Amino acid sequence: MTLEVRAVRKAYGSVEVLHGVDLAGSGGDVVAVVGANGAGKSTLIKILSGAESLDSGELWLDGQRLALRSPHDAQAAGIRTVYQELTLISGLSVTENLLLGRMPRRAGLIDWTEAHRRARGLLDEAGFSGIDPATLAGDLTVARQQMVEIAKALASEPRVLVLDEPSAVLAGSDLDALFALIRRLQERNVLIIYVSHRLAEVTELATSIVVIRDGTVVKTTEPARTSEDELITLMAGRKLERIYPDARPEPGGELLAVRGLSRPGEFEDVSFTLRAGEIVGMFGLVGAGRSELARCLFGDTRVASGTVCLDGAPVRFDRPAAAISAGLALVTEDRKRTGMVASMSVRDNIALATLQARKRGPLIDRRRQKATVNDMIAKFDIRPGDCAALPIATLSGGNQQKSILAKWLLAGPRVLILDEPTRGVDMATRVDIYRTIDTLARSGHAVLLISSDLAEVIGATDRVLVMRNGRISGEIRSDVATEDQVLGYSIREAA
Amino acid sequence: MTSRRLTKPAEATATSSSRGLRFIGGRPITPMGVLVFLLVVLVAVMALSTDGFLSERNLTNLLKQMVTTGLLAFGMLVVILTGGIDLSVGSVVAFTGIVSAGLIADLPIPVAMAVAIAAGIGFGLINGMLIAGFNLAPFVVTLAALTTIRGLAFVYSEVPIAPSDPGFFSLGTAMLGPIPLTTVIMFAVFIAGGIFLSQTPAGRAIYAIGGNAETVRLAGISVRKHVVLAYGISGACAGLAGVILASRVGIAQPSVGVAFELDAIAACVIGGASLAGGRGSVKAAFGGVVVLALINNLLNLHGVQSYWQQVLKGLIIVAVILVQRRSQRRRA
Amino acid sequence: MTSRRLTKPAEATATSSSRGLRFIGGRPITPMGVLVFLLVVLVAVMALSTDGFLSERNLTNLLKQMVTTGLLAFGMLVVILTGGIDLSVGSVVAFTGIVSAGLIADLPIPVAMAVAIAAGIGFGLINGMLIAGFNLAPFVVTLAALTTIRGLAFVYSEVPIAPSDPGFFSLGTAMLGPIPLTTVIMFAVFIAGGIFLSQTPAGRAIYAIGGNAETVRLAGISVRKHVVLAYGISGACAGLAGVILASRVGIAQPSVGVAFELDAIAACVIGGASLAGGRGSVKAAFGGVVVLALINNLLNLHGVQSYWQQVLKGLIIVAVILVQRRSQRRRA
Amino acid sequence: SSDNDGSSGDGKSKSRTVGVANFTLGGPYFNGMDRAIKAQAEGKGVKVISTDANGDAAKLAANVEDLISRKVDAVIISGGPLESAPAALNSLKAAKIPVILVDRKFQTGEYTSWIGPDNQRIGVQDGEFLAQQLPQGGKVAIIKGGPADNSIGLARTNGLKSALGKDSKFTLVEAPDFGNWGSDGGLSVTESLLASHKDLKAVFCENDAMCLGAQRAIANANLSSQIIIAGVDGQLEALQEIAKGGNYVVTGLNSADQIGRLGLDRAIEVLDGKSVEKDTVVDSPQITKKNAQEFIDKSKS
Ligand SMILES: Nc1ncnc2c1ncn2[C@@H]1O[C@H](COP(=O)(O)OP(=O)(O)OP(=O)(O)O)[C@@H](O)[C@H]1O
Ligand SMILES: Nc1ncnc2c1ncn2[C@@H]1O[C@H](COP(=O)(O)OP(=O)(O)OP(=O)(O)O)[C@@H](O)[C@H]1O
Ligand SMILES: [Mg+2]
Ligand SMILES: [Mg+2]
């Protein structure tokens, strides 16, 4: 069983985003595809899965030329894809999502007991036994939805399984389960194409690694014959001398002080402070309650008990607008649902939080707005560079994320709360983001960096707060912290 | 740098929005509860505030009067579940009514009625093909259909047709004991429809399409086919309603049925259906139909003046969906 | 339940329909191009097929007769952009018309008209508050409003009111050269509205809300306030339309304006607006208004009988949106 | 609740309840009728329950059923454009409740008594008057209220045609579009008409409401001196225009007030067991500049 991608080219409108990409693999391989945001990974995958047509080039499966006109053709050929974006039907049970179009029936009617049994089987086989097939897909956390997506893809016993950043929303045991699954599939001689920004897992899993930069394959190699540093350099096209910035000077006075903050069912008795000029990391297991805390600090949900002080003065935000005008900003963890307006242009999205800021009379000063937005696009190196007028939906995941950061930086916040800001973001871009928040901190801002990435949560911060079951379970200075310590705080069950 | 992640096994699935609910074929039954409550209240109010209400005649009237809205509401629900809407049902009622009355001149009554209903199905299928085939906005397509089909009804006969053959009235007037035949037919439609939507692959596909058409397509289910089917069902219900109405009134008018679609839609939404698609239950839609019928009956029995009736009806509908929403909120 | 459907049909078509297009303030200008083409064709057909068309009188009629739909269409567009819909405009037209005619008995004409328009705004704001404040389905809220406000119009006066003071007619009948004053007012509304939607923070917020209300809220913009504003604008336009219509006809009837909302919505959609919200342009909506007016005019000049007019109108509307869609497809 | 009370059971067994089933109250003529019935009932000490079917035949049937539930003693049906209402009539027959039809006589079904105008006759009157006014003939436009499922309008138009049609001096043009019985419709239809027929000599509308709109369109086109107008009903605003002696020259009285009052009286007579005329045609005097004022005074009083 062999798959070959030969000299594939693809252009959107006038912009060519793939300039002749080659890729090959055979049953049992795990071909990792890595590259910077906007490099063309998802596009390549959309072509493999029949979702996009290729302009030129060829796809060969077992010596047969594939002509994929629709995802359906791809599935018929045995190629199944789990997309970067979740596609479950939130209103239907997990069972129906898994067996969509293949529900067992008796006398024309659906046989629910049999259906649930089969769904159960699929989940167990995939190693995701924790999920109850009878729940609504919409009621699962993103992580769990992702697992159902994968189980669904396996249900049709594909010969090629394509995974686009499956680990972006997975963590811990879920991730381990995924890896175990991938290994089982390898033994079943399935070819796996695996897109990820997590070089660690790439080097751990892959049998071969394809590095794409700006739509061309710059190198095809194997884990044994390369290093993370080399990969990063190849992806970025330049040497990233240092990932995390130098230590910052001793922070200034207390900017944000949280005391005994609680929201029953979400988080309990949370206390911490942010000082001017410091970056504080917040680690925790998915579901620990960090996002809820962030949303509450930002005035999106009401404080049940406890106090929040800004510059020593108690504040109580009843809506995000209040928090923003007080100098807070929140980059949410869920780009598509709460981060951007897909139907609008990049410019409209970047300007969204500052519509009132640049006006001439009652009207928006279009010229100044354009200028400031273009500055941001340049500053964050958002690709393609002339995207201001494009709908943000056409940008790659990482570039969308940068646009959202740009939106908030325009609002000129003093306290910046980032919830998983580097999810699905490539290393070079991460470095940009670390730099940006570092400069912000140095200019007297305070940053709360919520992240599930141990290395980053320690490396990019001054202190690390750890959350477990909605409570702060520990705090460590980053310069002395070890990953095991932080992890320990996050999982150790209370005595 | 390694980036390992962990999660506590305890991090189980269900989030707040579903806590404490049971599911049928994977869809929540909450709105139903609220409706039942609402209905009990309404009935109590009416039984106490008016003496006419519980009289057999009035109850029979109620049963008769909910048939048209009921049939249209079921068809509308199916369409709404796909994320669409069918504004043309009122015109289809007019067209099928007048055609059925016109045809019995040359055809046996059952055949004439069958032909009329078939015409209704035809209109529905055309709507569906335009919407699914060219992916046009259902609102506009069926809006255009509303105009066109109304026009065709007049083209077929400018003047009302009052068949002399008493057999034509039997469908609309026959009683099974205290219950009108037409009401029984409506119940049958709702029961069959309920099973169709919750227990058959096609029914579930219709729900799924309303949820995420793209995913359904990838699952190898023909979205087009099922959307067309949905509008076909709506057309069938409208056709049946048209024939029944003509037979009940005893005279078929090309001008009948204006704004019928609005009550049907209102019934579905009162029943907690989401116009975005994917959410809604047959039971609850039926509840919505009953609520509307009770409101009308209440206002009539209290002899509220016509214009005030309109004013109050609007206000009551808002009140009802407010209660619905509140209850959903509390659960969420 | 939280929907994590990232490939909602809406979004999917959103990108696909816009891929490779130039954008103005985030919305595609294609539908405009198609419309212009359509208009040219229609006008050519009419100029050639009828002698009456280019007569000054006929052109003046055209200008007069598009005013009501035009005003309603702009208000409707604003509401549609937020992802809502306003079915109550027809009733608001009736209410404000009759109230303005009634009040001039005791008030100076401009004041009376202002009061009436204010009432229209009031209705709009109430709609908006119910919809945004309790997040109820716009369709049902404004449907209830349609009934209630119609009732109120009759409660205010069952019989038509024909003011004797000729000053009442001047608004509706004054001409600026060959162009009716009312038409000028409509143009003014569209121009001001265009600037409002594309150049002011509130306007952009309304677009954004239609795209993703959650994001807008977290960007510190009050969704509620802007949705209420949108319905207020729709109410204002309906109020203005009502006053103008009454003044033009010279007699205000509580029964006027039935189904006006449908033409307004049709105009927006012919103009390429998406009923899902976030997408639509003022220019294009105006194009839609003109197309509808031309269709009516064409059928009248050709003396097409009324129900055939209905049939053809429906078919033409479908044809028009088919052309729209195709063109978008081709570019996609 | 015991059977013998019902809505009529407010103490004195003498008191009667008459139900009114209106097909629509959406037009001045019809709610004029409704008000006349109530006004007359006031005087006679009869209770009236009025219902409105919003132009929906099925709802009319339903309303009648509701009225029966409320044990009315008689039902007056103002059927508007409705040709017939078998269901309603049947259930009333079954309940042995007398039925008085006002304005509209149903083609089919049994009723106790009918009181209404002769619409054909009114059309003829208008036609004859126009003939006098336009000795050398000319183009006469006809504006219909709605589709021919409303034979009231049809009768009026046919009346006019029978008066003018045979005379070769006259050419009749029917407006392609309906005026929907409202002034706004009358206005826009006339506007379109004038665009293609500048040489009109007269406009006939199936009711006065549309004439009022037509008159405005004609005025806006500065053709008031050229085009005269004829209508039907005797709506107050129309009478006032006619009295002014402008181009609105004639209408035929179809008095909702008169018919409504007679209708209620008829109902009472029936309930009193008097024997009554089956069909009563209310005569429809022609109203012109000469006699307009007296009718205005009458309707004011
Ligand atoms: N629908 C589209 N229309 C226009 N351009 C597009 C479209 N989809 C993607 N692109 C462009 O194609 C390029 C590659 O996008 P792609 O999503 O493949 O990047 P990626 O490698 O997946 O990035 P990421 O790691 O952020 O997901 C980007 O420049 C993006 O802007
Ligand atoms: N309302 C929601 N519906 C669906 N998924 C959600 C919702 N809120 C959060 N999620 C996703 O579910 C996962 C668990 O998030 P949740 O907010 O429940 O805990 P959390 O505080 O985000 O966890 P963490 O501490 O990692 O942020 C996250 O991946 C998040 O993106
Ligand atoms: Mg990608
Ligand atoms: Mg989170």
Image (cartoon, coloured by chain):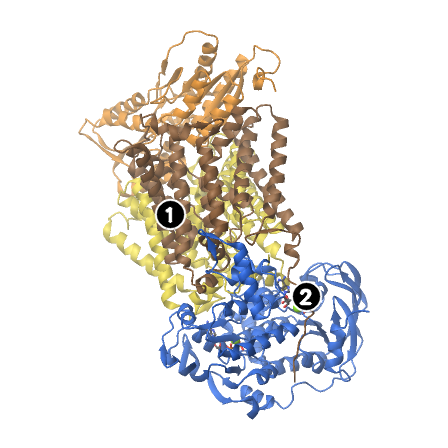
Chain colours: A blue, B brown, C yellow, D orange
- Residue found at x 46% / y 75%: A159
Q: Chain of mark 2?
A: B
- Residue found at x 55% / y 65%: A121
Disc 2 beta carbon < 8 A from ligand 2?
A: yes
SS for callout 1: helix
- Inspect this view and state whether residue B86 appears: yes
- Residue found at x 56% / y 34%: B295
Check residue C92 in the rendering and tell me which mark sits there, or answer none: none
A178 left or right of A394 in image: right
Q: Position of residue D109 (x, y in %)?
A: 36, 21
* Chain-order first, disc 1 or disc 2: 2
Report which residue position mark 2 lands on: B11
In the rendered view of the protein, which quadrant contains the C terminus of chain C? Answer: bottom left
Report which residue position mark 1 lands on: B124
A172 left or right of D185 in image: right
Q: Chain of mark 1?
A: B
A303 left or right of A93 in image: right
Q: Nearer the viewer, mark 1 or mark 2?
A: 2
Q: CA distance from mark 1 to mark 2?
A: 47 Å
B185 left or right of C125 in image: left
Q: Position of residue B44 (x, y in %)?
A: 63, 31
Q: Position of residue D285 (x, y in %)?
A: 35, 18
SS for callout 2: loop
**Number of marks:** 2
- Inspect this view and state whether residue A278 appears: no
**Is the residue at mark 1 from the same chain as the one at mark 2?**
yes
* Vertical order, A225 against C65 (above or below): below
Q: What amino acid is at disc 2? A: Glu
Q: Residues within 10 Å of mark 1 (few under 14, many from 20)?
A: many
Between C321 and B272, the residue placed more toward the observer is: B272
Q: What amino acid is at disc 1? A: Gly
Asked if the residues shown at circle 1 and circle 2 are in contact, with their CB atoms under 8 angstroms apart, the answer is: no
